[in-house]
Amino acid sequence: MKKQYDFLVIGSGLAGLSFALKVADKGKVAVLTKTNIHETNTSYAQGGIAAVTYKPDNYEKHIQDTMKAGDGLCNEEVVRMVVNEAPAQIHELINWGTHFDREKNGKFDLAREGGHSESRILHHKDDTGKEIQRALVKRVKQHPNIDVYEHFFALDIITQHHLGVLVKWRYTNIECYGVYALDIRKQKIVKFLSRITMMSSGGTGNLYSTTTNPAIATGDGIAMVYRAKGTVENMEFVQFHPTSLFNPNERPSFLISEAIRGHGGILKTIDGKEFMHKYDKRRSLAPRDIVARAIDLEMKLRGDDYVYLDCRHLNAKDLVKHFPNINDKCKSLGIDITKDFIPVVPAAHYLCGGIKVDRDGCTVINRLYAAGETTSTGLHGANRLASNSLLEAVVYAHKAAKHALNHFKKYEFNKQIPDWNDHGVRHPEEMVLITQSYKEVQQIFSVYVGIVRSNLRLKRSLDRLETIFHETERLYQKSVLSVQLCELRNLINVGYLIIKSAMHREENRGLHYNIDYPPTDEIKISY
Ligand code: FAD
Ligand code: SIN
């Protein structure tokens, strides 16, 4: 079965939907999403989106905060471009129907988060992502040129490789002609041909047992592009959010937004003592890498399973007004955030690296763009500044759309692309072979490739992963394709890149912390 579109978009988060809206007036667009259109990391975003709006804030401050958090690895040109583009893209989100909270005088109610020197986070209560997703989905559904394919799982991007051309590593003229996708409900593989493809498939939090990411975040886009011989970089920089709600067995882990610390919440150990002053002068509002490492160390030293976030000293009415969802969630577990400590623990949250793109969102594969969490743009460097991710997604969707609109007409649909080749007869396999390996991979990453790493742990994780890799490849060759099997295969692929990148980085920088290398000035923690 074949379908043909000018623009093919993988993913229905902020990056994918905003790209779709920006190109749809000029051509036919297909948006593929592997579950329903709302189930994205975007929908779970709480704190908000960073942008300079009023004095005393200015672009230079946002630029310097971003670069400082990035620990020397940000691309300054990219940082300047994104920060400068922010107000225009916020305007676009508002035009599409997004509501950001305002004060009585009509000005935006700006929040503050870790690493920001000013209050500059636009938000909608504590469910900003849900509000953005709501507005974009409504717009997309109204647009006559956009077809949304829910429950379609992109398996691989189509390149010359599928025409039998031998594509060598670093071959410079690789072209993307579309994707093969599994129609999950009909269990059929559909060939989507396109002039332009946008990879906006999000992050990979599910490599870890404890993550704030919903189940869709399995690094599929990064794995697909890596298999197609695109460039992937900066994979060692996995961000752990310092404060997910300690509620064992809940997946995804519920986030306790950093904006609560921006509002005055203070981290304490279980015996009620503050500890962040030992690690950074910004205390509970230091950048995430520092806070997450400090919590990890305090928990290890004390043998505790969590630390506390204390909001009891804050104005109760104000707290509940600003954080209604966090309040409701905690209440459902018997925690009154105005009177009780909130138990919190770090959880895998965001991948700073990914598919390398240039300033127009172009990958090294012709006709293939990428935007959002699946990419490495140079904005985040070694550590992402809070609330810069939604911003990056919408800015790069914009840049990519502009570039794609100038070029898409020169590309023809490739009529010679064959249907998906199933490589012989496939048999169903016991699902436990996949689910158990999935859990093992998560264990390996949580224990050996987490907030604190060592050379021995990394070597051990690689050895363990190799066994599961071979078992999974054998399964993939002979069994009926399932989403679970493909996601496991993609996670292994992305996990391999994370371990290899971590092994290559022989220093401590940003989110990457290895006890076999000397601590930097910023990291005053000794394990
Ligand atoms: P996503 O929104 O994750 O969308 C990915 C899409 O790709 C989904 O539709 C998925 O189904 C689809 N997909 C994936 N693989 C396939 C496949 N094989 N086939 C078909 N479809 C596929 N950032 C901020 O800036 N501010 C915040 O306040 C903030 N809070 C956060 C809170 C939480 C709990 C989490 C998890 C993240 C938060 N982030 C925040 C990060 C931010 O939400 C994400 O980085 C951002 O939304 C990513 O957007 P995206 O469009 O790149 O990907
Ligand atoms: C949060 O609300 O703490 C999440 C912000 C982010 O991930 O940028």
Image (cartoon, rainbow, N blue to C red):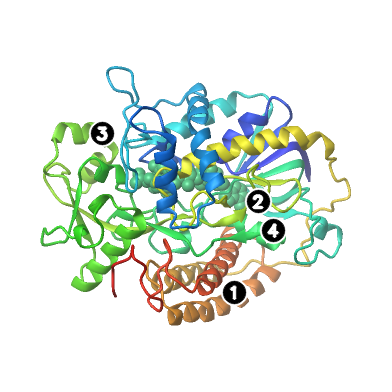
**Can see residue 451?**
yes
Q: Determine the CA span between mark 1 and mark 3.
A: 46 Å
Q: How many marks?
A: 4
Q: Determine the CA span between mark 1 and mark 4.
A: 20 Å
Q: Determine the CA span between mark 1 and mark 2.
A: 20 Å
Picture disc at residue 207:
none
Could you tell me residue 243's position as x and y percent?
29, 53
| Label 1 vs 2, first from the N-terminus | 2
Circle 4 is placed at which residue position?
A: 230
Q: Residues within 10 Å of mark 4 (few under 14, many from 20)?
A: many
Circle 2 is placed at which residue position?
A: 154
Mark 1 sits near ligand 1, with its Cβ under 8 Å away: no
Amino acid type shown at disc 3 = His
Amino acid type shown at disc 4 = Gly
Could you tell me residue 112's position as x and y percent?
31, 39
* Secondary structure found at label 4: loop
Which mark is nearer the camera, 1 or 3? 3
Asked if marks 2 and 3 touch (Cβ < 8 Å), the reply is no
* Secondary structure found at label 2: strand
* Secondary structure found at label 1: helix
Could you tell me residue 480's position as x and y percent?
67, 63
Question: Toward the viewer: 314 or 430?
Answer: 314
Amino acid type shown at disc 1 = Phe
Question: Toward the viewer: 53 or 216?
Answer: 53
Asked if marks 1 and 3 touch (Cβ < 8 Å), the reply is no
Asked if marks 4 and 2 touch (Cβ < 8 Å), the reply is no
Picture disc at residue 322:
3
Q: Residue furthest right?
A: 416
Residue 326 placement, left or right of 164: left
Circle 1 is placed at which residue position?
A: 469
